[in-house]
Image: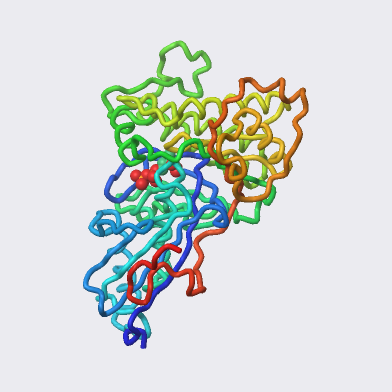
Amino acid sequence: MAAEKPLVSVTCTAPTNIAVIKYWGKRDEKLILPINSSLSVTLHQNQLKTTTTAAISRDFKEDRIWLNGKEEDVGHHRLQSCLREIRRLARKRRSGSDGDLVPLSYKVHIASVNDFPTAAGLASSAAGYACLVYTLAQLYGVESELSEVARQGSGSACRSMFGGFVQWHMGERPDGKDSIAQQVAPESHWPELRVLVLVVSAERKPVSSTSGMQTSVETSSLLKTSGHTPILLPSVLALDSWIISENWLIALQFRAESVVPGRMAEMARCIKERDFEAFGQLTMKDSNQFHATCLDTFPPICYLNDTSRQIISLVHCFNAYYGKTKVAYTFDAGPNAVIFTLEETVDEFVAVIKQVFPPEMNGDKFLKGLPVEPVELSEEVKSALPMEPFPGGIRYIITTQVGPGPQVLEEPQRQLLGPDGLPKPVS
Ligand code: DP6
């Protein structure tokens, strides 16, 4: 029986995701219920992932957690929500018969590591909480409602519970039971799609997503007004939009109510039909609207820096040169750019990036991830590029693709906790 073993442990990995229709703003801070639905692409774990080991033993005195080798406060309310929910679901599922399953009264030790910069706008909390919830679920034998639990760790984490293309339905219920993630298409659906993560800065972000979106909800009239400063919008029926008439509506939540619902439907269509032109344009527009909302927050939040803005110009210039959308950018709560493109464009666009942002120190470590072939740019393309070279602006590029959801690791050597239940020394 499991309880007689000194230590029972499970190790899993989970992916990060990048939103193409952004989540920004909560209607319930505690349950993490959003004011709008969102849609994301799960990135491949061969390049970016979190690994977590969770173990239980009769000998453990208390729940403990180590993140990237450092012990953290296990009392953090989001961590507690996830632990409590998984234990509650496990209890519900067992309803009295413990059988071969691990005892719920035993304390748990958790160790988790990211293989990418934490809190640099690369959705580390998404992969982290998705991995935590998935690993605990494996340990306690829980199978259902996992995205609902991961959401209570970090909103974007619920989307990392699936591979491929994933939507998070905002839901309507006050208890959040319908605020869940669902796969729109599997990772195999669009095999030519590529993702380049341009790491501009590995610094921690100045304002966390959690506090940034809270101030936006309170102050930005582009996102959501509090009711006393409504913005007026012409109804779609008003042909002469400058005449104030009964056709004007009061939009109390401009982005959340008037923009996102239409964009969710359109984005799902772009993905289903593999329409890169429309997918890329909508991705860029939604990223821009999210950053406009941040700038409309008071005091304003600026996640983009000069390099981010240069990347935006470069993408538009490259697309204008070809007369179509061949590359698209999106930025989360940080200056790093995530570029979507098709396999056929990767080598040339990376050469363009190297031309404008010549690698400074780490020439050989500049390109990580999937292989990229060197390309000689034509003089015509070079002269179409808008700016002077900016050495060192981009630290490195991670080339990746759409990937699967969380996985269980069977190999014992990949466990992060030793037989004593403490983190193994980093080799
Ligand atoms: C800009 O999920 O990190 O990346 O729910 O407070 O943990 P919390 O916030 P988080 O916010 C992500 C915001 C975003 C957009 C997105 O991923 O949809």
78, above or below 395, in the image: below
Residue for point 54% across, 34% down: 394
Q: Quadrant of residue 35?
A: top left
Please indicate whether residue 319 sits to the left or right of residue 255 in the image.
right
Q: Which residue lies most toward the top here? A: 243
Q: Please state which of residues 297 and 260 is positioned toward the viewer in this rendering.
A: 297
247, above or below 85, in the image: above
Residue for point 42% across, 52% down: 157
Q: Position of residue 309 (x, y in %)?
A: 52, 26
Ligand 1: image quarter? top left
Look at the image and tell me whether residue 23 can be seen.
Answer: no
Q: Position of residue 353 (x, y in %)?
A: 63, 33
Q: Quadrant of residue 298?
A: top left
Q: Quadrant of residue 419?
A: bottom left
Please indicate whether residue 98 sits to the left or right of residue 181 in the image.
left
Please indicate whether residue 18 sits to the left or right of residue 317 in the image.
left
Q: Position of residue 17 (x, y in %)?
A: 50, 49
Q: Position of residue 313 (x, y in %)?
A: 58, 24
135, above or below 161, in the image: below
Residue for point 57% across, 29% down: 391
Q: Which residue lies most toward the front here? A: 361
Quadrant that contains the N terminus: bottom left
